[in-house]
Amino acid sequence: MKILSNSPEVLWDCHMHSEFSADSGTPTEDMIRQSIACGLKGICFTEHLDPDYPPTPDNLEFSLDLPAYYSRLMELKEAYKDQIVIHFGIEIGLQLHLGQYFHNLLKEYPFDFVIGSSHVVHGADPYYPEFFQGRDEEQAYLEYFQSILENLDAFHEMDTYGHLDYIVRYGPNKNQFYSYEKYQDILDAILKKLVDTNVGLEVNTGGYHYGLGEPNPCTDIIRRYKELGGEIITIGADAHTPDKIGYSFNKAAQVLKECGFEYYTVFKERKPNFMKL
């Protein structure tokens, strides 16, 4: 385990998307140039791969041209090597039946970093309002968390778990009636599973730009992860456009300090490096 010194700022954004993700049209190079302009030391692209993603109203398909993505990123990594460090990552959309598929995939490419995320809950993505139609919000949230535990039982070869309470971005009342305490039993089971399998927890600042006033997951979950022995914390803004790169990282750093963390984590070649907050 390598400990690296750094300034008090968070200088790495380890969750971002570009034109290789179905939900972003931003040229990869534009994301790099903006990251440099923001003064970041390093970034990691984590393009989406969600096999068997269900049909959507906007006809998005979360496949990924991995050969093209890898080739382009290696070109840009070389071109900008004197200005910023660029890592090669992926965000995989977990579903129960995809464990073997992802196990094989992660052997095929030299990823630096792998985020495992739950976007699809038993065949539907809560990003779309249709997910909540005719359903109780509290029960929908509970089902989402139950699906995370199911996914972790089936597969845990990722480096970190992405935006653990992603669903609250899109609920009818967002996080107005949501709290760690309300779902404590299932959330503790998830966090214990992460700690036991050495999977990190992502602090995703997308929650701030979705108007939640907190990151994903919320502060109480981050604190509980620490209490249960969790040490691997990764940070990303989940940017799909240049203006969201490094979004509210100062707030994220403060949250981590308040929760008892002294370091955040940057993965290289699937190995954790701990950066001083």
Image (spheres, rainbow, N blue to C red):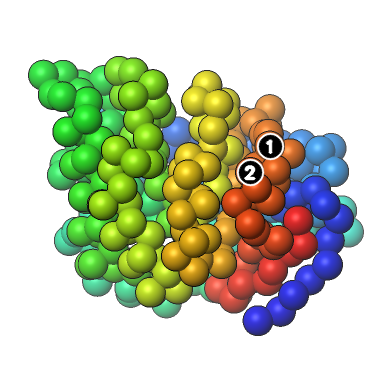
Quadrant for the N terminus in the image: bottom right
Whether residue 73 is visible to the viewer of this picture, yes or no, is: no
**Residue located 25% across and 57% down the image:** 149
Give the residue number, with chain letter if any, for mark 2.
255
Q: Quadrant of residue 116?
A: bottom left
Q: Quadrant of the C terminus?
A: bottom right
The amino acid pointed to by label 1 is Lys
- For this rendering, which residue is in front, 90 or 116? 116
Q: Secondary structure at mark 1?
A: helix
Q: Label 2 to label 1, Cα distance in Å?
A: 6 Å
Q: Residue at x 34, y 41 (%)?
A: 181
Identify the residue position indicated by label 1 in the image: 251
On screen, residue 128 above or below 44: above
Residue 54 horizontal/vertical position (percent): 21, 38
User: Between 70 and 3, which is closer to the camera in this rendering?
Assistant: 3
Q: Is residue 194 above or below residue 116?
A: below
Q: Tags 2 and 1 in contact by the CB under 8 Å rule?
A: yes
